[in-house]
């Protein structure tokens, strides 16, 4: 596999995409970043690639701290379970029962 | 009937004394956000519910170790994350996909081998973003555990690479490679989804 563009010192697309994590996370050395920027400025496909790559990480961040529905039945079972279990010595707690709760709504 | 939300100090004291009313209130207040954290690591309902149950119990049992000066939520969330990772590592039983089919292809000279369909989330397109977000969640859940765990820790829960490596018992370089491959997979999944609907 050839890794470097033989016509110039610019990164190839392959090198560019290989380095996107550090680029997107802002953990790249300035000199490497400058070279990558040079490639990006001349390569629309890699610009598209970078935009969609960073868009994924931004969308993933939006999943942080999202609440999920917990059915009332599940909450009731959790409460009963905790009341039973909290005063038992730890780690000698008996094996937990496999709950037969239904899926969150 | 749901118990009234408690102030942090009252919650901590109540959990320390194993007050059943406080335990009820604790479940009402924190089961939903904790379940939200756990469901990013697994969408399997029975796994997630079991992890939630175990997490709530651990929080109560470890409450004596909590430093009262700080906010209790990050501490609880850390317990949920650690618990999810430990539990899933022990109970892996998923049919896992191969990532190679979703990686970018290059020509011999290192240039991209095919035209790239680029897209990026437009904040104005609320409906599309909701759809993409749901596709993204499904795509994350379809990742093999060894890629899903570092990706979720990094991109959803915002842990630094060093901490993720330590939590998963990996080298930092391996951790970064896995996160990067997972991101490439997600990008390709969403790009194909997006190109299919336009």
Image (tube, coloured by chain):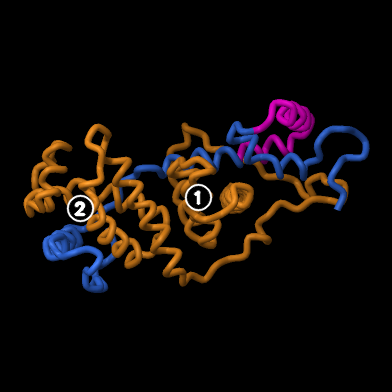
Q: Is residue A3 magenta?
A: no
Q: Which residues are magenta?
A: A28-52
Q: Which mark is residue B166?
A: 1
* Residue on which the image places disc 2: B60
Q: Is residue A29 magenta?
A: yes
| Residue beneath the point at 20% across and 62% down | A74
Query: Looking at the image, which is closer to me, B182 or A96?
Result: A96
| Residue beneath the point at 24% across and 32% down | B69
| Residue beneath the point at 20% across and 53% down | B60
Question: Could you tell me if residue B196 is visible in this image?
Answer: no
Q: Are marks 2 and 1 in contact (CB under 8 Å)?
A: no
Question: Chain B: what color?
Answer: orange
Query: Looking at the image, which is closer to me, B167 or B102?
Result: B167
Question: Could you tell me if residue B180 is visible in this image?
Answer: yes
Q: Chain of mark 1?
A: B
> Secondary structure under badge 1?
helix
Say whether residue B130 is left or right of residue A84. right
Q: Chain of mark 2?
A: B
Name the spot of residue A15 as percent of width and height, x first: 77, 42
**Dot placed on the residue nearer the N-terminal end, 2 or 1:** 2
Q: Main secondary structure of the magenta part?
A: helix
Name the spot of residue A68 as percent of width and height, x first: 30, 51
- Alpha-carbon span between mark 2 and mark 1: 25 Å
Say whether residue B121 is left or right of residue A103. right
Question: Chain A: what color?
Answer: blue
| Residue beneath the point at 21% across and 58% down | A71
> Secondary structure under badge 2?
helix
């Amino acid at each position: 596999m050839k890794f470097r563009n033989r016509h110039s010192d610019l990164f190839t697309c392959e090198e560019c995409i290989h380095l996107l994590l550090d680029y997107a996370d802002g953990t790249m050395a300035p000199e490497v970043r400058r070279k990558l920027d040079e490639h990006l400025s001349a390569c629309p496909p890699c610009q598209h690639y970078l935009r969609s790559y960073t868009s994924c990480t931004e969308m993933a961040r939006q999943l942080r701290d999202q609440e999920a529905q917990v059915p009332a039945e599940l909450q009731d079972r959790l409460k009963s379970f905790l009341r039973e279990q909290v005063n038992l010595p730890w780690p000698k707690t008996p094996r937990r029962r496999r709950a037969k709760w239904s899926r969150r709504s | 009937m749901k118990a009234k939300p408690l102030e942090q100090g009252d919650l901590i004291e109540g959990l320390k004394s194993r007050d059943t009313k406080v335990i009820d209130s604790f479940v009402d207040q924190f089961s939903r956000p904790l379940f939200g954290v756990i469901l990013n690591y697994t969408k399997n309902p029975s796994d997630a519910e079991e992890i939630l149950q175990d997490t709530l119990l651990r929080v109560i049992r470890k409450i004596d170790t909590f430093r009262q000066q700080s906010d209790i939520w990050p501490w609880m969330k850390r317990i949920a994350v650690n618990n999810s990772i430990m539990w899933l590592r022990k109970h892996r039983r998923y049919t896992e996909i191969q990532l190679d089919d979703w990686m970018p292809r290059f020509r011999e000279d290192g240039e991209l081998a095919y035209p790239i369909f680029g897209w990026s989330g437009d904040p104005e397109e609320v409906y599309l973003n909701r759809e993409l977000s749901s596709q993204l969640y499904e795509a994350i859940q379809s990742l093999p555990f060894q890629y899903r765990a570092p990706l979720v820790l990094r991109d959803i829960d915002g842990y630094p690479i060093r901490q993720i490596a330590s939590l998963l018992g990996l080298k930092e370089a391996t951790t970064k490679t896995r996160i990067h491959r997972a991101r490439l997979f997600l990008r390709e999944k969403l790009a194909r989804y997006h190109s299919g609907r336009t």
